[in-house]
Amino acid sequence: MMTVNPTSANLPADPEPRRTLREWLVDVLALIMGGLAVLYYKPDGFVVGLLVFVGAYTITNQLQAVNSNRSPEFAKFC
């Protein structure tokens, strides 16, 4: 049985990109905001607390994505 020689033909064309520091910081900020939302609203029960946390995390994460994808024309007004 022959072993396969790893050449450029066998390697994937576009490897999965590594996460940047900014992406890690956005995730940490979203987790912190989710935790702060739970502490601020003090929901009754685990399910309601989980919903508050997931909602705050999702909103924070999406708002950061909107900020990073703005166009150069929009950046002139900020």
Image (cartoon, rainbow, N blue to C red):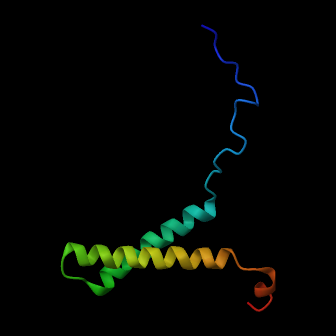
Image quadrant of residue 39?
bottom left
Extreme-left residue of the structure: 45
Point out residue 74 in the picture as x, y percentages from the top left corner: 76, 87
Quadrant holding the C terminus:
bottom right
Q: Residue furthest top?
A: 1
Q: Is residue 51 above or below residue 4?
A: below
Total count of labels: 0
Of 47 and 14, nearer the camera is 14
Position of residue 71 relative to residue 25, above or below, is below
Q: Residue at x 67, y 74 (%)?
A: 68
Q: Residue furthest front?
A: 1
Q: Residue at x 63, y 13 (%)?
A: 3
Q: Is residue 10 left or right of residue 40?
A: right
The percent coordinates of residue 37 (x first, y second) are: 36, 81
Who is closer to the viewer here, 45 or 15? 15
Instruction: Measuring from the top left, give residue 13's x and y in whole percent.
Output: 73, 41
Q: Residue at x 50, y 77 (%)?
A: 60
Image quarter of the N terminus: top right
| Quarter assignment of residue 38 | bottom left
Q: Nearer the viewer, residue 4 or 53?
A: 4
State the residue at coordinates (55%, 69%).
26
* 17 to 55, vertically: above or below: above
Q: Is residue 77 left or right of residue 21?
A: right
Name the spot of residue 40 as percent of width and height, x first.
32, 85
